[in-house]
Amino acid sequence: MASVFEQTIARNERIEPRDEMPDAYRATLVRQIAQHAHSEIIGMQPEGNWISRAPSLRRKLVLLAKVQDEAGHGLYLYSAAETLGVSRDELDEMLRTGRQKYSSIFNYPTLTYADVGTIGWLVDGAAICNQVPLCRTSYGPYGRAMIRICKEESFHQRQGYELLMTMMGGTDAQRAMVQESVDRFWWPALMMFGPPDDDSPNTAQSMAWGIKRNTNDELRQKFVDMTVPQAKALGVTLPDPDLVWNEERGAHDFGQPDWEEFWQVVKGNGPCNAQRLAHRRRAHDEGAWVREAASAYAARSQHD
Amino acid sequence: MTEHDEARPRAGWPLYEVFVRGKRGLNHVHVGSLHAADDQMALRHARDVYTRRNEGVSIWVVRSAAIVASSPDEKDSFFEPSGDKVYRHPTFYDIPDDVPHM
Ligand SMILES: [Fe+2]
Ligand SMILES: [Fe+2]
C-alpha cells in the first residue's frame, strides 16, 4: 500500500514540515534549498562590487535595493530549509567551509558596469525561468518562499534590461561595453540550468517527488526562446553561431556551453570561487562583535 | 511545536515566527521566520525582511518555541468530531429553488 507521503504526492498536494517523509526526500530538499539560499547570499557580491561606483544616485539606489532583495531571498530560503530540521548556523557554516555549493554563475567576475545590467537581464532572467515552476514544488515552505521571491525578481530583470537599453542609446564605447558583457555572460547563464538531462542522474527522482517540475534542458530551451527577441530589441547579438530558429520544432536550436568549464567551476576552479568564499568568511568574522554585542544587550535587558 | 521542530539543534539566537497584516481589515498571516537576539530586533528584522514593499501595516513576532500546535499524527482523531456533522453546512437543507433570498 502507498504511504501517506506517496498518496499526498500523487494527489499533487503539498508536504508540510511535520509530515512523515522519506529521508532521501528530506536530504534532497535540504541540499537544494540550502544551495539556493547560499546562491542568493553569495550572489550579492558580484553586483555589490559596483554599488560604490554606480554612475548616478538613481542607479545606486536601484542597485542597493536589488542587492538587499537578494539578501532577503537568502533569508526566506534559510527559513524554509530550517523547517526540515537543519539549523541556520549549520547551513551558514556549510557555506563558509565549502561543504555546500552555490550557483556557479557567481564565480564569474563583474569587470564592467554593463555587467550589472547583464546580470539583471540574463542571470535574474534565467533564475526566473528556474524559479517560476518551483512555486509549485511539493514541499510547502519551499514553494511559499519561491512565490515571494518570484514577485520580486521581475524588478531585478527589468532594471537590468533598462540599464542596458540606456547604455545602448549612448556612445559607441558604451554599446561595445554592453556587447562585450553579453558575450561573457551568455554561456555561464545557460549553464545555470545545470548539466544536460543525460548527465543529470537525480532529475528523475526529483521530478517523481514533485520537487522539480521541469528538466534542465526544458528550462534552458525556454530561456533561450524568451531571450532571443529581447536581445534583438536591445540590439545585441548572442555569441552562438548555432543559434537559429527551427520552424519544425517551433523553438530555437542552439549550441552547448562548455561543460568541461562548468564542472571545473563547480569543483572550485572558477575565476572567483576563492574570492567569493574568502569574502563571505571575512564578513562573518568581522560581524562577530556585532552578534556578541546584540546577544549581551538582549541578555541584559531580559534581567532588567 | 511549530513548523520548526523543537528537537532540532538550536545554537545561536532564538527563532521567531513572523505574521503580517497586509492591510486594515485582514488577519495577520504567517509569512516565515527569522532569528533575532530579542523581541525588538525580531520586529525590526521582520520589517526589513518581509515588508520591503509595503506588504504590511502590522507585524507580530512570536518565539517559535511558544507556539502550541496540533500534531499531524493526530490528524484523523483530532479533527474527526467535525467530520460527520454535515448538518452544520447550509447545503444539508433542501429548500425549493423558488424560495427567494435563501
Ligand atoms: Fe534572488
Ligand atoms: Fe534577483
Image: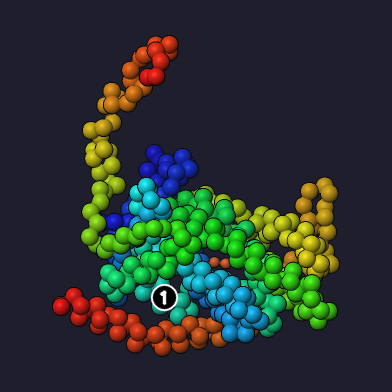
> Residue under circle 1?
A92
Closest to the observer, A258 or A33: A33
Q: Is residue A22 above or below residue B39?
A: above
Q: Is residue A41 left or right of residue B60?
A: right
State whether residue B63 appears in this view.
yes
Residue A244: x and y, percent? 83, 59
Q: Is residue A262 left or right of residue A38?
A: right
Question: Which chain does the residue under circle 1 lie in?
Answer: A
Q: Quadrant of residue B16?
A: bottom left
Q: Is residue A179 left or right of residue A60?
A: right
Residue drawn 23% across the image and 40% down it: B78
Q: Quadrant of residue A216?
A: bottom right
Q: Is residue A16 above or below residue A95?
A: above
Residue B101: x and y, percent? 39, 19
Residue drawn 25% across the image and 48% down it: B70
Closest to the observer, B25 or A271: B25
Element at badge 1?
Answer: helix
- The amino acid on which the numbered mark 1 sits, given as a three-letter code, is Asp
Residue A198: x and y, percent? 65, 59
Residue drawn 54% across the image and 71% down it: A65
